[in-house]
Amino acid sequence: MQKEKKKSTISNSVKAYSDYGNFIRNKFGERVQKISINVGFTCPNRDGSKGRGGCTYCNNQSFKPDYCEPQNDIGEQLKKGIDFFSQKRNINKFLAYFQSYTNTYAELDLIKDLYLKALSYPGVVGLVIGTRPDCISEELIEFLSELSKKYFICLELGVESTLDRSLEAVNRCHTFAETQEAYKMASNKGIYLGAHLILGLPGESRDEMLQHAVELSKLPIDFLKLHQLQIVKHTVMASQYRRNPEKFNLFEIEDYLDLLTHFIGLLRPDVVLERFISESPSDLLIAPKWGLKNFEMMHLIEKKIAKENMWQGKFYKELKSDSLS
């Protein structure tokens, strides 16, 4: 980790990669549950500021919990979320996860008020804030830096791809250079920095996807979420897939496992891997339909890593150029 204040270490005696669950247990001494919050913000590629229609793959209903409704205030959403998870497990600490859309895309005073309300709720020990690289500012970073002196603060940026042509094709309306600048602005401020990446965007080759690991490793990120491209109903991409399915090379399970294994080997070893896959609700998912639960996929991933004698960062020091061929 790049920040001095992080004293905890991650135990990787079992897993061949830096695991988020281990990190959280080492950090807090117990399990901590994220509680998703939807405050009704939009995105600059939706409201006309930069574009219309949002990202071509995006349907927020595909990952938003039932309790997470913007018409409910933050306290009510947190109560419902905490009650939901407390029925299943004995959990005492929670992270307020500002998840839907772009959660820094509003007036700064409103943003501050919402974050402080979440942190004032009993049991909430920090924030995870999902946003875009082009929607942060020096003033926001300074505010989050102050909060980080008392709370766990993570800023999670949607990188999605390191290739500008892919970002343009999916209507992100920002460049990878803007992503790099955003991380530079937010680094060394006491804030944990996360990244989200989609593997399998149309037109990206296997070598280009592996190169994402190389480029991400150059960024000051602490956490990384990965998932396979999914075609979800009620999205622009669903219409594109229906018209031109040949332009999409969706992963078979074995191909995805193979890519992940090599991706991990190229990744900087201290980046904490928070997620490898995602599965949209069955009533929204068009493809690929793997029919496996998350724990089943995790078993397959770890089995593949062991079979290939792979570990995170195995090839990290060996990289001499941008070529992976």
Image (tube, grey):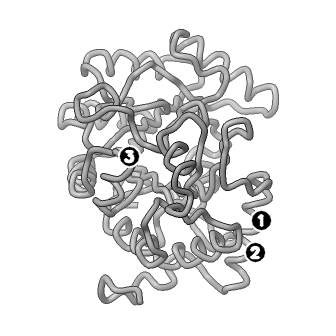
* In-image side of 45 versus 28 (left or right): left
Disc 3, SS: strand
Residue at 25%, 53% (x, y): give it: 175
Badge 2 crowding class, 10 Å Cα cut-off, few under 14, some 14 to 19, many 20 or more, is few
45 w.r.t. 278: above or below = above
212 w.r.t. 87: above or below = below
Badge 3 crowding class, 10 Å Cα cut-off, few under 14, some 14 to 19, many 20 or more, is many
Q: How far apart are marks 3 and 1 (CA)?
A: 28 Å
The numbered disc on residue 303 is: 2
Q: On the image, numbered disc 1 is attached to which residue?
A: 299
- Residue 275: image location, x then y, percent: 59, 55
Residue at 34%, 86% (x, y): give it: 323
- Residue 198: image location, x then y, percent: 49, 56
Q: On the image, numbered disc 3 is attached to which residue?
A: 157
Question: Is 149 or 265 nearer to us in this picture?
Answer: 265
Q: How far apart are marks 3 and 2 (CA)?
A: 30 Å
